[in-house]
Each structure stands twice: as C-alpha cells, then as structure tokens.
C-alpha cells in the first residue's frame, strides 16, 4: 500500500534532480516551472505522510534546507509569468510596453542571481532525504491507512469550508488554490488509499479546472503588484499607455474574481464517493 507513495516520491524527486542539473545552464522558463511544480507535488505528498504518521514526521523540518531555493524559484516563476502576460497585453491592447518589459527583464536577472546563490552546494538529497522518508513510512500503521487518508481529505475540506465562510479576501481565495492543487496532485494516491473516487464533490479534471481558474485570477493580482513597483522606480511617471494597461488588468482581475468566488467550496453534498 505504501508503494504508491514511494513511487510518486521517486518520480517527482527525479524531476526535481533533473531540473536542479539543467537550470544553472540556462534558467529556462520551462525548467523553472517544472522544478516549482515538482516541489509543490513533493510538499503535498510529505504533508500526507506527516498526517498518516501521526506527526512523527515534520514536512517543515524536512524541507528547511531548501527554503531559500524554493522561495527564489517561486519569485522567478512569477516574474516570468508576468513577462508572458505583458506580451499578451501588448498584442491585445495594441500597446508598446517595452519599458515595462525591460524592467521585468532586469528584475528577472537579479532574481536569477539570488537563485544562483541559493543553489550553492545544494544537491537533491540534501533537501529530500530518502532515509527520513522511509523511516516515516515505516511508522505508518497500515491497518488504519484508509481511515486516516479519509480524515486527511476531510481536514482539507473543513479548512476550505471554514476559510470560505470568513470572507473572500485575496489571501483566502488564493489558499483555496493551494489546497485544490494538493488534492489534485495526490488524487490517484488518495483514491487508492481512501477507497473514495470523488473528492470535495469534484472529479480530478474538475479540481484541475477550478484551481487553474484561481491561478489565472491570481496572475492578475501579481500583475498589479509588479506594475506598482514599476511605477515607483525613481519617481517614474509612466506614459498614459500604462494607465490603460493598469485599468485593463484591474477589469480582468475583478471579472475573474467574481467568477472564482462563485465556484469556491462551500460544503456541497456528496463531498466524496465510495
């Protein structure tokens, strides 16, 4: 039963290691994205192991050595996504946003410098220690795995339910995406270990669609953050075209949030199906 966890770990640990070797060669967008995704998948898995082992294993301590690396990869990915959005806005609005693109390009290279420092002598095994994970898996009571996996899913649904009843501020809405991604990443493992086939009232594809919808909205939230930083440079007074861009981003952000909020988890019936 634990084999599915070990196989998943090996698969995405290998992806991480391969990215760790490739990224210093060119810092390509696809490699940064692939590494970030592998980190998120492994973190989701480790949180499940922590839950199943009755907290005998700590995900936070396990990933401590890679904290700076993870943060740099995340920031660099955000900047690269913003660069791609700017190209789309140039085409959509018929604007020349070369000043902003140059600003993002410089910011990207500064972040690459931070990432280089984060790499240092780091190796995959320094961050993801196979021995610690194996010891944690041995501590899991196989007789109660199904019950505990079901409890893990219920804990995620309860977190979403309580959070979404408090209000739809940006931080909480984005947290929805984090949890939905964790369920999506672990969907096949959760299905096998829990005996359930539907989670949070959604199929795997529906969860993917929902979290991507939130992701597209949050990209616009980030856009406004980076535009604000751009406007602050040396008291820079941007041309009118940047106010046109800002208004377009505002409009898309608000329209997307309205659609996202309608789909937030509020405790539907049949949250899981045996």
Image (cartoon, rainbow, N blue to C red):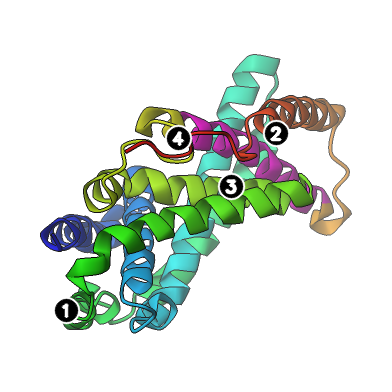
- Using residue 109 as the reference point, say whether residue 143 is left or right of it: left
Q: Is residue 49 above or below residue 94?
A: below
**Image location (x, y in percent) of residue 123:** 23, 76
Q: Is residue 105 left or right of residue 228?
A: left
228 within the magenta span: yes
For label 1, the SS is helix
- Asked if the residues shown at circle 3 and circle 1 are in contact, with their CB atoms under 8 angstroms apart, the answer is no
N-terminal of the pair, mark 3 or mark 1, is: 1
Earlier sequence position, callout 2 versus callout 1: 1
Write down the residue under mark 2: 261
Instruction: Check disc 1 and report the residue beneath it.
Output: 138
Specify few, some or many for label 2: CA neighbours under 10 Å numbering under 14, 14-19, or 20 or more: some
- Badges 4 and 1: C-beta atoms under 8 Å apart? no
Give the residues drawn in magenta, as a range.
209-231
**Mark earlier in primary sequence (3, 4):** 3
Residue identifier under label 3: 176
Residue 88 x %, y %: 58, 24
* Residue at the spot 69% in from the left edge and 28% down from the top edge: 262
Precedes in sequence: disc 4 or disc 1: 1
Q: Position of residue 257 (x, y in %)?
A: 71, 32
- Disc nearer the start of the sequence (2/3): 3
* Marks 3 and 4 close (CB-CB < 8 Å): no
Rounded to the nearest whole Å, what is the CA distance between mark 4 and mark 1? 31 Å
Q: Residue at the spot x=39%, y=67% of the render?
A: 47
The residue lying toward the viewer, choosing from 109 and 160, is 160
Q: Say if 100 sits above or below 125 in the image.
A: above
Disc 4 to disc 2: CB gap under 8 Å: no
212 in the magenta segment: yes
Marks 3/4: CA distance? Answer: 11 Å
**SS at mark 4?**
helix
């Amino acid at each position: 039963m634990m084999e599915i966890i070990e196989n998943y770990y090996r698969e995405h640990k290998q992806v991480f290691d391969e990215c760790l070797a490739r990224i210093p060669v060119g810092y390509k967008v696809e490699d940064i994205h692939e590494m970030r995704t592998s980190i998120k998948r492994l973190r989701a898995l480790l949180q499940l192991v922590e839950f199943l082992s009755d907290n005998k294993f700590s995900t936070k301590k396990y990933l401590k050595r890679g904290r700076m690396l993870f943060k740099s990869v995340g920031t660099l990915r955000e900047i690269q996504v913003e660069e791609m959005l700017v190209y789309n806005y140039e085409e959509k609005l018929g604007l020349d946003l070369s000043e902003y693109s140059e600003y993002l390009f410089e910011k990207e290279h500064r972040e690459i410098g931070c990432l280089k420092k984060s790499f240092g002598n780091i190796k995959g095994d320094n961050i993801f220690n196979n021995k610690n994970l194996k010891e944690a898996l041995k501590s899991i009571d196989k007789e109660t795995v199904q019950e505990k996996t079901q409890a893990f899913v219920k804990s995620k649904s309860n977190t979403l339910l309580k959070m979404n009843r408090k209000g739809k501020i940006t931080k909480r809405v984005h947290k929805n995406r984090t949890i939905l991604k964790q369920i999506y990443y672990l969907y096949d493992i959760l299905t096998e270990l829990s005996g359930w086939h539907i989670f949070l009232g959604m199929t795997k594809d529906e969860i993917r669609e929902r979290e991507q919808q939130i992701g597209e909205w949050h990209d616009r939230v980030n856009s406004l953050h980076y535009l604000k930083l751009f406007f602050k440079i040396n008291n820079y007074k941007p041309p009118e075209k940047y106010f046109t861009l800002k208004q377009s981003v505002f409009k898309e952000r608000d329209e997307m949030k309205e659609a996202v909020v309608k789909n937030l988890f509020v405790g539907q019936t049949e949250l899981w199906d045996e």
